[in-house]
Image (cartoon, rainbow, N blue to C red):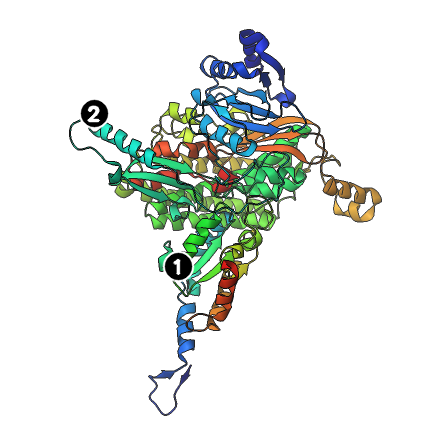
């Protein structure tokens, strides 16, 4: 963005894409898909000491239709997986997914008959946050990385995400 | 005291008692399958073993009678416990103990789900932890640990017939004379509470049939966080199971660590030195405080009291700083070791704990002040989700939920471990067994935990924290890097695991939610043959449908929060 010289100081010019992305990345409305230990750390992240709202993702919504960022916090079992898929499908575009912690990212140390080996087996995942569970700082780092990614996104929907979705659904 | 029970059974049933043993003081009797229900009934009604606390299945594929089904009974008035075992072949039915206890319902379903042992006379024999489309029985020794199955359809808990039946019952309850309007099946609304619902902790599901806002009937479903702890345990060495225990009740991982270590130590027959024990008491009680803070904070926020959530979570955050200083991690602590602790306290620990305990007291004071006479809170909590003393025992309640009904059962007092008998503390109890009583019992328990920690800090002795036994505890690093014996010792303990002598032991203690126990079976190798967790949440959530039936939908949320169901422990 830049202030145009020769005009009054009240006008800014920018590219539409940049302005939209700027708005999107600082007003993420997360839906916590909390299932296990990571959900406890997610609660710590939103409570006053760590305070997620400092990063522009304050409005935690529990309705998928009102949110655009899903934070999968916890282990997803094969029994849970169809439900995760349904909830994801209920979110409006554009939408992003953070896999918080190793269970959501890859199954973690639960390599067994009950545990889905990562959320990306059923839904496209944008960001993986390491840790078991990740500290709140770690989650914030993941969130800021996601904001960088949104900054590079197209207005409608990035090909990158379309590609990921096609792979999962196909 | 429990040998009395064995004698009484032998006198009453004679030949039907096939065998009895008391390895490590846990009394087991093996009974003929045909007399099982008589023996259980006798223990319950004549010998005062009022609670069926767990049912354990064990698979021995090489034996003709392949499965052991073990009923764990206990008294809540006296320190008496007994395990009643029966042996069955594959496909052979066991008579269901649902005739005697309502808690048998879920426990037997679990054995059916994971081992495929059918129970005759069980009212609702379905899978419980695994998905209804799952094929095979996961805890059988021939089921591969990594064989996952992709599953599709979520199960409907109420069929059309069930809805019609519920509508008929609701009509009868409303108009016993048969006058007035009938409630038709189409008047009832079926709603799914959870599993993806903020108040249902992401993993609990209850399907409710609503007439207006009143819950006419409800059924609960679990297993959405079934992470196969028990199967994983069989695949690891005894020591490598420790990090998995962190993630059972992830609100109080230290308690799980300590109680698991105690259980395996009981099986090996070693005892941790005094300093180790006192530190274990301190971390256990810190953990209990954190557990109760999370429970009370989230329970109140579910009722709309956000301020209290900030108050409780601030002090919890302060407590986490102690835990983080102690073991480098906030939640998944992995602090206890079989035979001791991973390392000693850090410098300045004592002062920091004392300072944060002061903070805790202020915070409890603030929360109680905000809640005790708050009209909204009282309206939503008093008389809501109440359960009677008899029902609570019948359902297998332990911990704060049982004490809220006025039963003074606390494992720390009744079966003292870690030297709890030397501490001066009270057992807070309630009267009404409702949401309000459960919250208040938890608040009072935090104060008692604070008292215990202060006494423990006062008496903290010097000395070793680990047992002096090279076959249990890893050698110090100087030895590992400095001598071949040290290297070999480390190598064998890591790769082959601690060689636990063959046998069975049940180690348990007072967890955040009640009696947390590990029923361990060793075949004399470095890997557990079977570990069965006795999660306090499991029987408590088994009563959830009973608690919310007839209440409002908003009561269901308040009730659930006060029960403090932790899915990691519930589903394992």
What x and y, as percent, mark residue B162?
33, 33
Chain letter of mark 1 equals A
What x and y, as percent, mark residue A142?
52, 62
Left or right, residue B60 beside residue A24: right
Using the image, determine if residue A32 lies above or below residue B336.
Answer: below
Residue at the (39%, 48%) spot, across then down: B197
Give a yes or no on whether discs 1 and 2 share a subunit: no
Q: Quadrant of residue B67?
A: top right
The residue sitting at the right extreme is B484
Distance from disc 1 to disc 2, alpha carbons, whole Å, reads 47 Å
Q: Nearer the viewer, residue B93 or B444?
A: B93
The residue that mark 2 highlights is: B176
The residue sitting at the bottom extreme is A6
SS at mark 2 in the image? loop
Residue at the (62%, 27%) spot, across then down: B505
Structural crowding at the residue carrying mark 1, measured as other residues with C-alpha within 10 Å and reported as few (<14), some (14–19) or many (≥20)? some
Classify the position of the N terminus of chain B by image quarter: top right
The residue that mark 1 highlights is: A91
> Does residue A1 show up?
yes
- State if disc 2 and disc 1 touch (CB < 8 Å): no
What x and y, as percent, mark residue B160?
33, 37
Q: How many marks?
A: 2
């Amino acid at each position: 963005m830049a202030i145009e010289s020769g005009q009054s100081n009240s006008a800014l010019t920018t590219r539409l894409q940049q302005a939209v992305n700027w708005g999107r990345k600082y007003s993420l409305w997360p839906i916590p898909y909390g299932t296990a230990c990571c959900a406890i750390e997610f609660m710590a992240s939103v409570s006053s000491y760590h305070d997620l709202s400092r990063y522009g993702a304050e409005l935690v919504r529990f309705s998928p239709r009102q949110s655009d960022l899903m934070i999968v916090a916890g282990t997803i079992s094969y029994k849970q997986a169809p439900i995760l898929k349904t909830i994801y499908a209920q979110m409006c575009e554009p939408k992003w997914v953070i896999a918080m912690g190793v269970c959501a990212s890859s199954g973690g140390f639960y390599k067994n008959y009950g545990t889905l080996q990562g959320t990306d087996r059923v839904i496209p995942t944008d960001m993986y946050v390491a840790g078991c569970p990740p500290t709140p700082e770690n989650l914030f780092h993941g969130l800021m990385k996601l904001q960088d990614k949104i900054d590079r996104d197209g207005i409608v929907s990035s090909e990158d995400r379309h590609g990921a979705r096609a792979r999962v659904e196909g | 005291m429990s040998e009395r029970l064995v004698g009484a059974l032998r006198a009453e049933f004679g030949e039907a008692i096939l065998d009895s043993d008391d390895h490590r003081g846990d009394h087991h009797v093996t009974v003929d399958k045909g007399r099982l229900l008589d023996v259980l009934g006798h223990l319950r009604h004549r010998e005062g073993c009022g609670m069926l606390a767990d049912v354990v299945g064990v698979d021995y594929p090489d034996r003709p009678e392949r499965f052991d089904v073990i009923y764990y009974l206990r008294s809540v008035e006296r320190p008496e416990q007994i395990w009643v075992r029966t042996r069955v072949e594959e496909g052979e039915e066991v008579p269901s103990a649902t005739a005697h206890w309502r808690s048998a319902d879920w426990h037997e379903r679990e054995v059916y789900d994971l081992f495929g042992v059918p129970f005759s006379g069980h009212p609702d024999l379905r899978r419980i932890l695994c998905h209804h489309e799952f094929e095979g029985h996961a805890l059988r020794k021939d089921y591969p640990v990594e064989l996952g199955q992709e599953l599709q359809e979520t199960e409907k808990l109420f069929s059309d017939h069930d809805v019609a039946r519920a509508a008929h019952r609701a009509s009868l309850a409303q108009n016993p004379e048969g006058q007035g309007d009938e409630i038709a099946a189409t008047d009832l609304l079926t709603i799914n509470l959870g599993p993806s619902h903020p108040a249902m902790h992401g993993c609990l599901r209850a399907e409710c049939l609503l007439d207006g806002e009143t819950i006419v009937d409800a059924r609960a479903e679990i297993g959405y966080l079934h992470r196969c702890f028990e199967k994983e345990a069989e695949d690891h060495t005894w020591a490598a199971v420790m990090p998995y225990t962190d993630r059972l009740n992830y609100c109080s991982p230290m308690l799980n660590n300590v109680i698991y270590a105690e259980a395996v130590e009981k099986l090996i027959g070693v005892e941790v030195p005094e300093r180790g024990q006192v530190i274990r008491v301190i971390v256990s009680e810190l953990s209990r405080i954190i557990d109760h803070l999370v429970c009370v904070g989230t329970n109140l926020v579910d009722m709309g009291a956000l301020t209290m959530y900030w108050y409780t979570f601030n002090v919890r955050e302060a407590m986490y700083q102690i835990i983080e200083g102690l073991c480098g991690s906030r939640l998944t602590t992995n602090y206890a070791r079989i035979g001791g602790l991973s390392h000693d306290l850090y410098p300045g620990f004592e002062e920091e704990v004392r300072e944060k305990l002061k903070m805790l007291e202020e915070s409890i004071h603030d929360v109680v002040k905000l809640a005790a006479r708050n009209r909204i809170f009282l309206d939503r909590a008093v008389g809501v989700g109440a359960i009677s003393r008899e029902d609570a025992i019948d359902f297998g309640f332990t911990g704060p939920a049982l004490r809220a009904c006025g039963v003074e059962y606390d494992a720390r007092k009744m079966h003292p471990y870690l030297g709890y008998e030397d501490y001066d503390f009270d057992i807070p109890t309630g009267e009404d067994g409702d949401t309000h009583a459960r919250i208040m019992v938890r608040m009072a328990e935090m104060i008692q935990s604070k008292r215990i920690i202060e006494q423990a800090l006062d008496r903290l002795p010097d000395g070793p924290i680990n047992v002096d036994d090279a076959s249990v505890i890893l050698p110090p690093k100087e030895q590992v890097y400095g001598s071949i014996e040290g290297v070999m010792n480390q190598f064998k303990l890591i790769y082959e695991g601690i060689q636990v002598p063959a046998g069975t032991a049940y180690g348990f203690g007072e967890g955040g939610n009640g009696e947390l126990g590990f029923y361990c079976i060793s075949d004399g190798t470095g890997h557990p043959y079977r570990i069965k967790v006795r999660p306090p949440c499991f029987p408590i959530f088994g009563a959830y449908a009973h608690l919310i039936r007839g209440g409002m939908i908003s009561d269901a949320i308040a009730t659930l929060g006060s029960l403090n169901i932790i899915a990691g422990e519930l589903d394992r």
